[in-house]
Amino acid sequence: MTMHIPDQTGRTAIVTGGSSGIGKATAAALAANGARVILAVRDQARGRAAAAEIGPHAESRPLDLGSLDSVRDFAAAVDGPIDYLINNAGFMTATRRLTTDGFESQFGVNHLGHFALTNRLLARITGRVVTVSSRNHRTPIDFDDLRWERQPYRPFDAYRRTKLANLLFTRELQRRLTAAGSPVLATAADPGWAATGFTMTTGRPVLDRALAAGTRLLAQSAEDGARPTLLATLGDVPGASFSGPGRFGVRGPATLEKPSRDALDDDAAKRLWEVSEALTHTTFSLDSAG
């Protein structure tokens, strides 16, 4: 699917992880068409450099998704309506680490940080909440061991669980938005195989080297990888949809993908939402910023 980006003058987008890769490419495309873009990034030196490169419609603000205090402070500083919240930032680590709040770091950053950010901003969002997931989302969530305390840490499985969490979050958010009568849409996107500087860490050195070599030879550009995110943000797509690259789910024009059966599990989506509310101390609310 080829997508024309309409004029975005007067619209505001927040892009987490917008200093590089898919996030930067997404922000640049929106800004080039007139949108005001806020790059929500931890490293402000990189964020300011990216904003300067994108142009006068972009600015950088500090956000550490591994800290619920940082999420709260960022959300409190955002003024006015938000047309698009693009939960793009992703994190992967080869060893078990914890966030500031004691969560397993991949789950904490990739899911819980974005969950809390969305809830704190939801009352001001007028258009869409777009969450970047992955076709690598086919590992069920172990709700009894979210911190990986009882089992050997497997980094790639931990990552895949967070990508499933992104899709379950999107599904439950859309259900709640629809029930509340809100016109806001929750959508998800898969960038496919893109050369972005993001390093896949499976815990198996031979496979890691093979993936790195494949990226150099086969991956599409960050700009091409951003096309599913832009489709999920601006395209004529339904709520809870999953956009991705049209050629074998790896590269090519953006289209709609069918997520796995696990990603369509409404009971798991509801359970994840309830657990996430308890862990982040944020709730679904269209009456206040949370």
Image (tube, rainbow, N blue to C red):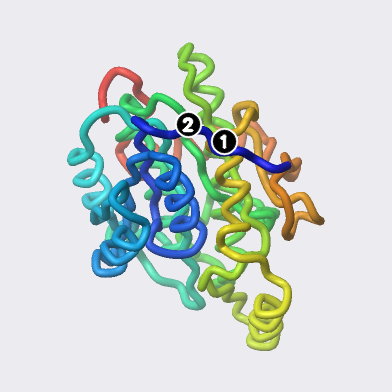
Residue 276 in sight here:
no
> What element does badge 2 sit on?
strand
Three-letter amino acid code at the position of disc 2: Arg
Q: 19 or 77: which is nearer to us?
A: 19
Disc 2, disc 1: CB below 8 Å?
yes
Q: Which residue is mark 2?
A: 128
> What element does badge 1 sit on?
strand
The percent coordinates of residue 162 (x first, y second) are 54, 54
The percent coordinates of residue 186 (x first, y second) are 53, 32
Residue count near mark 2 (Cα–Cα under 10 Å), binned few <14, some 14–19, many ≥20: many
Which image quadrant: the C terminus? Answer: top left
**Looking at the image, which residue is at 55% across and 38% down?**
5
Left or right of 23, for residue 39 = left
Mark 2 vs mark 1, CA separation in Å: 7 Å
Q: Which residue is mark 1?
A: 187
Left or right of 256, for residue 153 = left
Q: Quadrant of residue 1?
A: top right
Q: 15 or 2: which is nearer to us?
A: 2
The percent coordinates of residue 8 (x first, y second) are 43, 34
The percent coordinates of residue 238 (x first, y second) are 64, 26
**Looking at the image, which residue is at 70% across and 54% down?**
138
Residue lying furthest top in this view? Answer: 181
Residue count near mark 1 (Cα–Cα under 10 Å), binned few <14, some 14–19, many ≥20: many
Three-letter amino acid code at the position of disc 1: Thr
209 lies above or below 135? below
**Looking at the image, which residue is at 43% across and 64% down?**
20
205 lies above or below 153? below
Left or right of 153, for residue 105 = left
Q: Quadrant of residue 43?
A: bottom left
